[in-house]
Amino acid sequence: MNAAAPSFPGFFQGTEMPTAGWWEALWPDPAGVLAAVGLEPGMEVVDLCCGDGWFTLHIAKLGRRVVAIDIDPDLLEVARHRLAENGVTNCEFVAGDAYELAGLVPRPVDFVYMANAFHGVPDQPRLTRAVRDTLKPGGQFAIVNWHRRPREETVILGEPRGPTTELRLSPEQTVKAVEPSGLKLARLVEIPPYHYGAVFE
Ligand SMILES: C[S@@+](CC[C@H](N)C(=O)[O-])C[C@H]1O[C@@H](n2cnc3c(N)ncnc32)[C@H](O)[C@@H]1O
């Protein structure tokens, strides 16, 4: 989003991990975001495209067990360190491509959380099928996306931030990308100032 794109094959466009300063300013209450999308205590969760673990820590504090997945092993190390510093031990860190989700998770989970990455997935139906196959019956898939607003309007700490305007998805576009998998929209939630959550089950 504001750094050079890593050169991993399969890296999703416009999903570089932002620098910590403005990311933490944008997300002062990660636990509140998780509550808004319906994460509940005791769930088994995948944090898909977890980055440096800003949300993962709070998922693991609430959940029973977490698998945190990212294509970038260096970011996983940052996430691992963040959780260890906080004494959180119920999270497994797995380096891999989100498309390969089914092979990266040992058993089905209650909840797959994917924040700030779905917009960059080239084949969103393929990714969604992989998520569907990883969910227990009745399991949920929460996507947190930037609203489809012009990038110059999404200012944080004095600068426009986030993916390019062209990459951003409206809630309707997200629903259209996900529902062919068989997962159906359960709820849409606002996550001010610039995001929404779309939860499917
Ligand atoms: C913008 S960051 C968001 C991180 C975290 N979800 C958050 O909201 O704080 C997107 C993450 O997606 C990861 N990513 C990009 N392409 C991926 C792929 N094909 N499979 C798994 N992770 C990927 C990047 O390495 C990056 O850490």
Image (tube, rainbow, N blue to C red):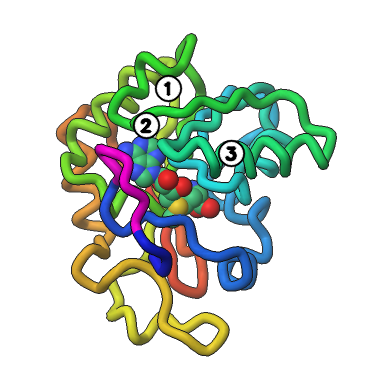
Q: Secondary structure at mark 3?
A: loop
Asked whether the residues under the numbered discs 3 and 2 touch, taking CB atoms below 8 Å apart as contact, a structural biologist would say no
Q: Quadrant of residue 3?
A: bottom left
Q: Residues within 10 Å of mark 1 (few under 14, many from 20)?
A: few
Q: Is residue 170 among what the camera can see? A: yes
Within the magenta stretch, is there residue 10?
yes
Q: Residues within 10 Å of mark 2 (few under 14, many from 20)?
A: many
Within the magenta stretch, is there residue 91?
no
Name which residue type carries label 3. Answer: Leu
Q: Which residue is mark 1?
A: 138
Q: Residue furthest bottom?
A: 158
Tag of residue 39 = 3
Q: Nearer the viewer, residue 2 or 157?
A: 2
Is residue 199 placed above or below 167 in the rendered structure? above
Q: Main secondary structure of the magenta part?
A: loop
Residue range (magenta): 5-11
Alpha carbon of mark 3 to alpha carbon of mark 2: how far? Answer: 13 Å
Name which residue type carries label 1. Answer: Gly
Name which residue type carries label 2. Answer: Glu
Q: Which residue is mark 2?
A: 201
Is residue 128 placed above or below 35 in the rendered structure? above
Question: Could you tell me residue 66's position as x and y percent?
Answer: 60, 26
